[in-house]
Image: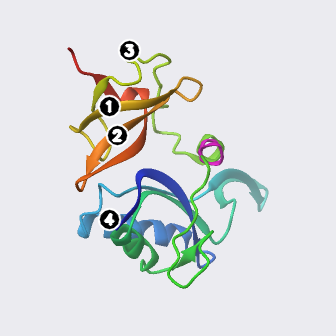
Amino acid sequence: MVESIDKQWYVLHTYSGYENKVKQNLESRIETMNMQNFIYRVIVPEQEVAVEKDGKTKIVKENEFPGYALVEMVMTDEAWYVVRNTPGVTGFLGSHGGGSKPVSLTPEEADDFLRKFGNPDEEPIKKPKVLDAEVGETVEIIAGSFIGMQGPITEIDNTKAELTVLVDFLGRETPTTLEFGDVKPLLS
């Protein structure tokens, strides 16, 4: 069952000192279990720190939050199962146990985190500032899990450069929030 069809960031509890091993394990499981459309990225919050030892300065990566890692995923039962059963993962932050799904980071929290700890090798994603479509118009999704799907726009948020589109998911019209760059208007 799909709890959310939007990819969101979740915080994982891990064994302290095993954060990078959890990242490796999870990335391997994503490939072998064919979960690329549901689990996207895993980040361990590390920063480079200058450490002096024996009179020499050395740059080392230091874990900012020992015992935690972040995962960007679509929260489905199957994806949740794959992540929480990855060796080294002890649970999700914001999950109350007893089979309850975890709470994701807010978009603001995720943006702040990614600015500080995101992969420096990645090109920053430039969001278009203006959408060449209006509420009620049909757009085609050109990126993400629902690539190729079409649906009408129900809401536009110019401050966040996001829009909400109704997509037919498993026979139900489901609202999904997308960035302006993830859609293209259909020509009438």
- On the image, numbered disc 4 is attached to which residue? 30
- On the image, numbered disc 2 is attached to which residue? 166
Q: Nearer the viewer, mark 4 or mark 2?
A: 2
| Distance between the alpha carbons at the discs numbered 3 and 4 | 36 Å
Residue 66: which quarter of the image? bottom right
Q: Which of marks 1 and 4 is in front?
A: 1
Residue 95: where, in percent of width, then height?
59, 73
Reading the chain from its start, which is encountered first: label 3 or label 2?
3
Marks 1 and 4 in Cβ contact (< 8 Å): no
Looking at the rendered structure, the kind of residue marked 3 is: Asp
Position of 21 with respect to 32 (left or right) is right
Q: Nearer the viewer, residue 169 or 47?
A: 169
- By secondary structure, the bulk of the magenta-drawn segment is best described as helix
Q: Is mark 1 on a helix, strand or loop?
A: strand
Reading the chain from its start, which is encountered first: label 4 or label 2?
4
Reading the chain from its start, which is encountered first: label 1 or label 3?
3
| Depicted 135 relative to depicted 24: above or below | above
Marks 3 and 2 in Cβ contact (< 8 Å): no
Q: Which of marks 3 and 2 is in front?
A: 2
Q: In what quadrant of the picture does the N terminus appear?
A: bottom left
| Distance between the alpha carbons at the discs numbered 1 and 2 | 6 Å
Q: Is mark 2 on a helix, strand or loop?
A: strand
Residue 152, label in figure: 1
